[in-house]
Amino acid sequence: MLKVPQAGRVKTRLGADLGMTTSAWWFRHQSAALLRRLSDPRWELILAVAPDRTGLMTPIWPAHLPRVAQGNGDLGTRMARLMYGLPKGPVCIIGADIPGITPAHIARAFAALGRDEAVFGPAPDGGFWLTGLKRSAPPPPGLFKNVRWSCEHALADSRASLGGLRTTLIDTLQDIDTAEDLHNLAHAAPAPVLSR
């Protein structure tokens, strides 16, 4: 899931610290690097874009990647719409503001969906950077309803919305919301090299 990197419309908390143009520039380059890094024959990348019309038409992202509109509603409504609407089979949804995502992380998420019905990649702030469903049966009707977004309860509330589906947690990764997050990322110890 990603937004068109327009100043004042994307990464606004980061923009409050660095300036809206700088935060949009960061997001544009971060999302481009992420798309290059996650291009892999083991899965199909589909861009769930916002705003709908601009996102479907913008030349910013690679033209060969299919795009779907996120539509209206809060984050949960938009993610549920994707889970209900994409072609049958396992689906993982990620945000584009997590610099640490590697193909190995995505492979672990899909491997978890071979064993369990749902997977989350937690974030240190109580949210998550990845959610996935096996989708061997229709997703539960309350999927992502009553979730307190942008707080320490987002992951717990999202798990509760799954109606008891067996869930696996994979790696914890940091998303970038503030200048402090960027600072912490720049000063973090190098991540270990992951391999299959």
Image (tube, rainbow, N blue to C red):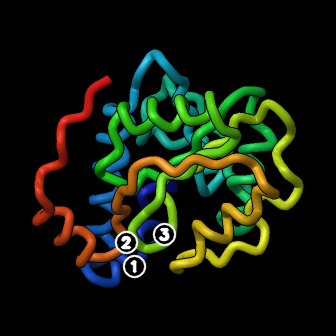
Q: In this view, does 182 lie above or below 120?
A: below
Residue under label 2, please give it. Answer: 177
The amino acid on which the numbered mark 2 sits, given as a three-letter code, is Asp
Most foreground residue, 109 or 25: 109
The spot of residue 95 in percent (x, y) is 48, 53
At x 54%, y 31%, the residue is 110
The amino acid on which the numbered mark 1 sits, given as a three-letter code, is Arg
| Res 13 label | 1
Q: In which quarter of the image is residue 86?
A: top right
Mark 1 surroundings within 10 Å by alpha-carbon count, few (fewer than 14), some (14 through 19), many (20 or more): some
SS for tag 2?
Answer: loop
What count of labels does the image hold? 3
Circle 3/circle 1 CB separation < 8 Å: no
Most foreground residue, 76 or 194: 194
The amino acid on which the numbered mark 3 sits, given as a three-letter code, is Arg
Residue 1 seen in this snapshot:
no
Circle 1/circle 2 CB separation < 8 Å: yes
The spot of residue 155 in percent (x, y) is 58, 66
At x 48%, y 69%, the residue is 9
In front: mark 1 or mark 2? 2
The spot of residue 154 in percent (x, y) is 59, 71
- Report how far apart the C-alphas of labels 3 and 2 lie in the structure: 13 Å
At x 79%, y 30%, the residue is 136
SS for tag 1?
Answer: helix
Residue under label 3, please give it. Answer: 9
Mark 2 surroundings within 10 Å by alpha-carbon count, few (fewer than 14), some (14 through 19), many (20 or more): some
State which tag comes first along the sequence, 3 or 2. 3
Most foreground residue, 182 or 72: 182
